[in-house]
Amino acid sequence: MSQPVILCTIEPAANGDAIAPLIVLGPSLGTTADLWAGVVPALAQTHRVLCFNLPGHGFSPRATAAFTIEEIADAVVGLVDSLGVDSFHYAGISLGGAIGLALAVNRPSRLTSLAVFCSGAKIGTAEAWTDRAAGVRASGTPSLIIGSASRWFAPDFLGRDPKAGSNALDALLDIDDESYALACEALAVFDQTDALSAIRTPVLCVSGELDTVTPTVQLQELAARIPGARAVEIAGVAHLPALEQPIEVGALLGEWLAGASAAAARPAEPSSPDRTAASAYADGMLVRRAVLGDQHVDAATAAITPETAVFQDFITRYAWGEIWTRPGLDRRTRSFLTIAALVTGGHEGELAMHVRAALTNGLSRAEISEAILHTAIYAGVPAANAAFAVARETFAGLDAAVHNSTIRPS
């Protein structure tokens, strides 16, 4: 293995600040830095923007030896070092998102924030990637056009924006075959799943509603495994949101960067108890909404009375702001523990809410059932039997809601 050579462009901040914060944008496999062209102007209002090309893509030289995703991440750090920049924001799509996760795992002190679009700690299967590498070596990147068009874009995108779609597909034709194949082989062995719970960088996980390569559930599960991560879905897009909806992606990233920068500038130990309480409440409300959903939290907030206001403030600050935000456990694990504790305590009234929350946090129905079954041994069969009844009713209600939402008037 050897560190590949990658080249980049740098857009200065429009406000003239020569030392404005830096955001690095990573492309997906088979695309170039042009993937982000529609997003750069929005980000460049307040940031310097670095866009790089993968080996053998665009103006980056072709790869001459095998490389790993982690080695590309090291090459990204080398580009940043050449600017004399210490910490930076990073956003990447698909393979570019995998590079971002490698940075968060191996170079955490360098990242101010990370936005992962349509990616994962492991993408696809090793066999699929090695098969694609072999196919490209045999037939070249032109053989990828039809498959890429169906994977990359929402069904109506080429009709809505034929120029952007054709430009992206035309760029694929010029990518070096061997470099593309080596990138496939790098993805075949990439797997940071076991390292996710140790990530401390603020992470935003973004999915495309129509993406079949890395569907929304995969990004939700990714966020659930990273302490404090947030998951967002962009409607009407597939695997390349920055190309399909650049204005929406630019706005989303702008909001994310502003929040992450403010959090990074916040003192580690607030100067007053009042600020500590306010911060815990704000953080708790964010996590509470992410786990339980806006509809539930809005209903609970609307139902607050003078008699319950102190309690609502208490659970938001302490349960959600102090415990659920702690980095020692990811949200999946906390959901497992919460279900077990509620079953053991016989708290069926809270259980339905946390069964739904567990699904949001990436647990499957089978895993929830296993958690309840496990408690039967240690908390008693009657408690588990009652819990299964709650879970069964909750699953049925969710299924009914999905069924009703798919019915359309004739």
Image (cartoon, helix red, strand yellow):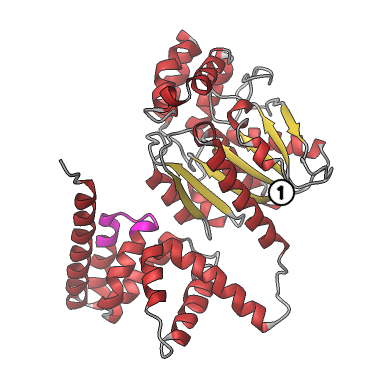
Q: Which residues are magenta?
A: 359-369
Residue 387 point in image, percent of width and height: 22, 71
Q: Is residue 32 visible?
A: yes
Secondary structure at numbered mark 1: helix
Instruction: Pick out the residue farthest to the front.
Output: 410
Q: Say whether residue 98 is left or right of residue 392.
A: right
Residue 371 point in image, percent of width and height: 29, 64
Q: Does the magenta portion include 306?
A: no
Q: Residues within 10 Å of mark 1 (few under 14, many from 20)?
A: some
Q: How many marks?
A: 1
Residue 46 point in image, percent of width and height: 73, 46
Instruction: Pick out the residue farthest to the bottom.
Output: 307
Q: Say whether residue 301 is left or right of residue 173.
A: left
Q: Is residue 73 visible?
A: no
Residue displayed at 73% across by 29% down:
9
Task: Choose top left, top right, bottom left or bottom right for residue 391.
Answer: bottom left
For the N terminus, the quadrant is top right
Q: Say whether residue 112 is left or right of residue 372.
A: right
Residue displayed at 44% across by 12% down:
143
Say if 351 sits above or below 409 in the image: below
Q: Say whether residue 384 is left or right of residue 279.
A: left
From the image, tell me which residue sits under label 1.
110
| Magenta highlight: main SS | helix
Q: Nearer the viewer, residue 109 or 281?
A: 281
Name the kind of residue labelled 1 in the image: Arg
